[in-house]
Amino acid sequence: ISLDFEDCIKDSPNFRDMVHQSEVDALELESQIDRMVKHCTVMVDTGKVYNNACKGFIGSIHEVGYGSTDDPFVQETLKRFTQTMSEVTSFHTMLFDQAQRSVKTQLSSFLKNEVKPTRDLKKTFDKVSDDYLSALSKHAGAHKLKQNELDDTNAVLNATRKCFRSVAMDYVFQVNMLHNKKKFQCVDKLLSYMRALFTFFHQGYDLLKDLEPYMKSVSGQLEEVCKTNEDTRKSMVVEQERYQSMVILYLFALTGDSGMYMTWINEAIVIEGHLFKRASNAFKTWNRRWFTIKDNKLFYQKKKDDLTVVVDDIRLCTVRMSDETERRFCFEIVLPGKSFLLQAETDGARTAWIKAIQSSIGAAFKDTMDEIQTQVTYIPAAKKDTKSDNSNPTSFLEDGTGNIITKIYRIPGNKTCADCGKAEPRWASISLGVTLCIECSGVHRSLGVHVSKVRSLTLDQWEPEVVKIMFKLGNNHVNEIYTANATPGDHIKPGCSDDHRMAYIRAKYVDRKFAMSLPKALGPQPAYHGTTGTRLTRWTVSKRRRARPSPNRSPNRSRSPKVGFDCMTSVETCTDPNKRCSLFLTDELSSMFSYFDGSKYTSAGVVRADVNSQILICPDLASPVFDFRISPSVFTSHGKEYEETEIFDLEKLHPDLLMYRSAEAANLPVMLLAKCNNAKVNWMNDSDEGKTALMQAAISGSVPACEFLLVNGAKLESFDWKKRTALHYATLHNQTSVACQLLKRKIDLNAVDEDGKTALDIAVDAANADIVTLIRLKKMSDEMKE
Ligand SMILES: [Zn+2]
């Protein structure tokens, strides 16, 4: 509303009405602005609270990002997001500041400096108006005859009118000013707030626009993650269904609510649950314990981390029902040398436990077979590099036939026929350890297998044991023994006549005309050794033993520097058991035997001995003394090599004893020397409980020595005074490789010694799980064949 100066001067009713109206307007304006300021204050204060909440929110997101060091994607994304959010918060802060400045502060001051003074002025106006009106009334009411009174009222009236007009003019001015300012102030302040809003959203838009490409890439990555998650979820669902259907339903059907549980942990079945166990003390109290079958072990615990292993290798135990006590639902676990009683909750639970333990035993055996199967699958890979890589000794034996020739040619002297010297011999005598040309091999064959057993290097299957004989001997060593006394004229040449060849080979191997005799072998030393004329009176047998490295020790520690001085050994130690075991496989069982055979296979807790005997007698080894030493069959499990020497009277040395002792030392050249001097392979040593050379070789754990004896006619069914066989001794001395070899050669499994024990009994007593497994598998296989 605007007031008019003219009306003001007139003081018309219109003016008065307008003044009243302006008063109402001012009041309304004051209350409106007041409300606006109040709401703006609330908005700004709430905004500050909001900003603080945002900061807290950003801080917590930042913590998540900071903690995601293992996930760079999450870390980087959250970092970028919180940066943007922090900027948005600072924009908000600016917006609220602007609202505070432009709206709240300035409108407050407008109210205070403009509206309120106007209203104050109105009060003054009202008072002056009243004075003016009363002066008018007095003036009008004065007596016309009283001049003094008239003068007074007139003066007052003039003064009040003057004052009224002045105040009224001021007021009109103020009201009009306010009216104009009202437009300006409100709109202007709100306009600046709107600008602030514009800036706020504009900056926010720019900021998020910049982030948009990054958000898109995050979204892309998230889709992939989601897909992976979905795949994982699906496979988990599948797994869960499989688990539920296969395991839980089946197992609970099997076990009922018996307190026995089976779970799959790392693809292995774990059986566990509570059982009462009878204490082995005198009180025979029954205690509730948590029993577990895992990794072929049976153990129980009273509390967490308080484990007692009852059965170290489940293959060694048997389980059966027991009605021994007054208690119900008992069963017994029988171990070598002990047994203990357990009680289940119900009869069904007892059955379930017994079945579970029995199937664990079965599974343990199956695992052994599976391991062998896995080894068998190495064949194609090994075959691949057969031809390309002849120089690599690890590939020797890989296909069992053709390539064997390359390896056998590496043995000194083997590239020419041992008898006539013809190049590239294709045949071999496994009982003598020599290579032969086809003509000479024909003569060998005609002499009978008791003299020479002939095999083709290219056509026949070569078993690893037999190959080992070849590696331990070779043409040079054999000829040093068999042609020690030959003159140059005695030898034959490749193109000689059949008769000549026949005569020479007969003389060499049957009559042993040129052979090194025992006394000659023993000394006196040849002049070139510098000990001319020394006559020996004693001989000793030396054998080095070295504990096999057990799987959890580092190869460096167990490798003795002394090992490998023997040229043969160096070839052999390079063989890779994985590849090697893949050879010569015709059926499952024989593959298993190849697996165990002389390989570096070790299972936890069983330590095998490795024998590295010195080659003693062969002159090219320049051993000045015929000196071999024997260590007893006791050895440490710490990989230490040591020697022990036994000294024998030279007078009492004879070929049989030499064979016997060299079998123990696993020294094939010396064994051949003994054979060459007509040693009896099956001679029983009366001073050693009637043991045979084969038993000695079995005790030593030497596969080549055993094989050499077997191809040279050693009998598997020999018994010593304790009625033990070589298998008994291999088992007693934990010689798994030899046990395997003997089983493969079909030694009698059921032979009983004087204590009534079979080899299996001994293995069970000694808790030698490998041999137990071997023998049981062999039995299973025999039964299947029947
Ligand atoms: Zn020949």
Image (spheres, rainbow, N blue to C red):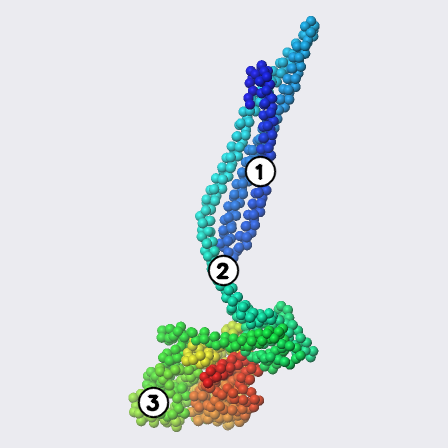
Q: Which amino acid, mark 2?
A: Arg
Which mark is on residue 233?
Answer: 2
- Residue at the disc numbered 1: 43
- Disc 1 residue type (three-letter): Met
Q: Sequence-wise, which precedes: disc 1 or disc 3?
A: 1
Residue 480: image quadrant is bottom left
CA gap between label 1 and label 3 equals: 115 Å
- In the rendered view, tell whether residue 233 sits above or below residue 464: above
Marks 2 and 3 sit apart, C-alpha to C-alpha, by 71 Å
Q: Amino acid at mark 3?
A: Gly
Residue 22 at what x, y percent from top left?
58, 23
Q: Nearer the viewer, mark 1 or mark 3?
A: 1
Residue density around tag 3, few if under 14, some if 14–19, many if 20 or more, within 10 Å: some
Q: Quadrant of residue 528?
A: bottom left
Q: Residues within 10 Å of mark 2 (few under 14, many from 20)?
A: some
Mark 2 vs mark 3: in front = 2
| Ligand 1 is within 8 Å of the C-beta of the residue at disc 2 | no
Relative horizontal placement of residue 423, taking residue 51 as reference (left or right): left
Between circles 1 and 2, the one closer to the viewer is: 2
Numbered badge on residue 442: 3
| Quadrant for the N terminus in the image | top right
Q: Tell me if label 2 and label 3 are in contact, CB under 8 Å.
A: no
Dot 3: what SS?
helix
In the image, residue 673 lies at what x, y percent?
44, 90
Report the residue at 54% width, 42% height from top.
90
Residue 157, relative to residue 767: is it above or below? above
Q: Residue at x 42, y 84 (%)?
A: 466
